[in-house]
């Protein structure tokens, strides 16, 4: 299903880009999105970018490692990494071309947070022929994209309890899926009835997004990097090269990055951005 649904979502994104950039006043949004203002780059901006990278690529939470454990032995892991990061960056860039021009065209606040997509896109659909159809199709595909992402996160917990606790897959999936669903309700309600409830000036969804993306995931990245660099290096190298099937010429650099550069850099960005 993913092989059909996700490409369908990309096609709709391309259609939305055409409509968004042709809205009156959209040019200001395009300039805001594509013209860098280096004077505004500070520790908090870098920390936010780091958090976005961790969240978007599912780093520091075990998703990539869990999925990679299901790869066939002959899979070229480094090549897969390049494909994943490249496509993730491309889709994020396309999504920005949909949202930011529309934000300025309709006079929305570009700093509104993660819920901005659900504010701007309905306005864009309202300006399109057969907008209701496109909206239904887009949000349906977005729902499936979110479900598949949720499954990847759920699999981390499920795989642990299957492998370490001997729990049946169905039982683990239902139990922890239900727990995660219940824990997600406040985030959903914070966009509606609970919007007046704030923590540190943020609605619950934005607060959890900040805590997870800007603090918890970078911390996870630091610990994983240290673990791989100092305690799991030999095994990690075997896994990355598929038991020597592929060469990894930059392995020495990778080792230095895992042991020293990545933990120090992430820690510095994390502390500076708080």
Image (cartoon, rainbow, N blue to C red):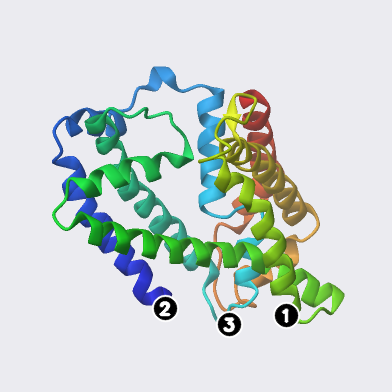
Using the image as rendered, state which of residue 83 and residue 187 is in the foreground.
187
Q: Quadrant of the N terminus?
A: bottom left
Q: Which of 241 and 19 is in front in this view?
A: 19
Residue ID for mark 2: 1
- Numbered circle sitting on residue 169: 1
Residue position for label 3: 72
The residue positioned farthest toward the front in the image shown: 193
Q: Quadrant of residue 250?
A: bottom right
Gap between marks 3 and 1 measured at Cα: 21 Å
Identify which residue is drawn at 31% across, 46% down.
Answer: 121
Say whether residue 201 is visible.
yes
Give x and y (percent) for residue 97.
28, 43
Q: In this view, does 99 lie above or below 112?
A: below
Residue 60 visible (yes or no): no
Q: Nearer the viewer, residue 192 or 220?
A: 192
Evaluate if marks 3 and 1 touch, with contact meaning CB atoms under 8 Å apart. Answer: no
Instruction: Name which quarter of the figure residue 174 lies in.
Output: bottom right
Q: Quadrant of residue 168?
A: bottom right
- Whole-percent x and y of residue 64? 60, 63
Q: How crowded is mark 2: few (under 14 residues within 10 Å), some or many (20 or more)?
A: few
């Amino acid at each position: 299903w993913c092989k059909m649904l996700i490409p369908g979502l990309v096609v709709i994104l391309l259609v939305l880009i055409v409509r968004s950039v042709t809205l009156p006043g959209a040019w200001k949004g395009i300039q805001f999105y594509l013209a860098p203002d280096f004077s505004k780059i500070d520790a908090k901006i870098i920390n936010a970018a780091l958090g976005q990278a961790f969240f978007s690529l599912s780093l520091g939470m075990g998703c990539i490692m869990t999925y990679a454990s299901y790869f066939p032995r002959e899979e070229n892991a480094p090549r897969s990494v390049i494909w994943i990061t490249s496509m993730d960056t491309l889709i994020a860039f396309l999504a920005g071309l949909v949202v930011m021009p529309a934000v300025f065209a309709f006079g929305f606040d570009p700093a509104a947070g993660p819920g901005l997509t659900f504010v701007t896109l309905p306005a864009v659909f309202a300006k399109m022929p057969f907008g209701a159809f496109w909206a239904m199709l887009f949000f349906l595909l977005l729902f499936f994209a979110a479900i598949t992402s949720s499954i990847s996160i759920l699999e981390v917990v499920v795989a642990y309890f299957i492998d370490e606790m001997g729990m049946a897959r169905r039982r683990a999936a239902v139990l922890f899926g239900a727990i995660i669903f219940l824990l997600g309700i406040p985030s959903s309600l914070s966009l509606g009835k609970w919007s007046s409830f704030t923590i540190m000036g943020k609605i619950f969804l934005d607060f959890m997004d900040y805590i997870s993306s800007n603090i918890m995931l970078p911390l996870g990245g630091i610990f994983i990097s240290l673990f791989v660099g100092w305690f799991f290096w030999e095994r990690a190298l075997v896994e990355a090269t598929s038991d020597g099937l592929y060469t990894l010429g930059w392995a020495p650099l990778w080792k230095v990055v895992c042991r020293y550069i990545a933990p120090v850099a992430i820690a510095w960005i994390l502390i500076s951005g708080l």
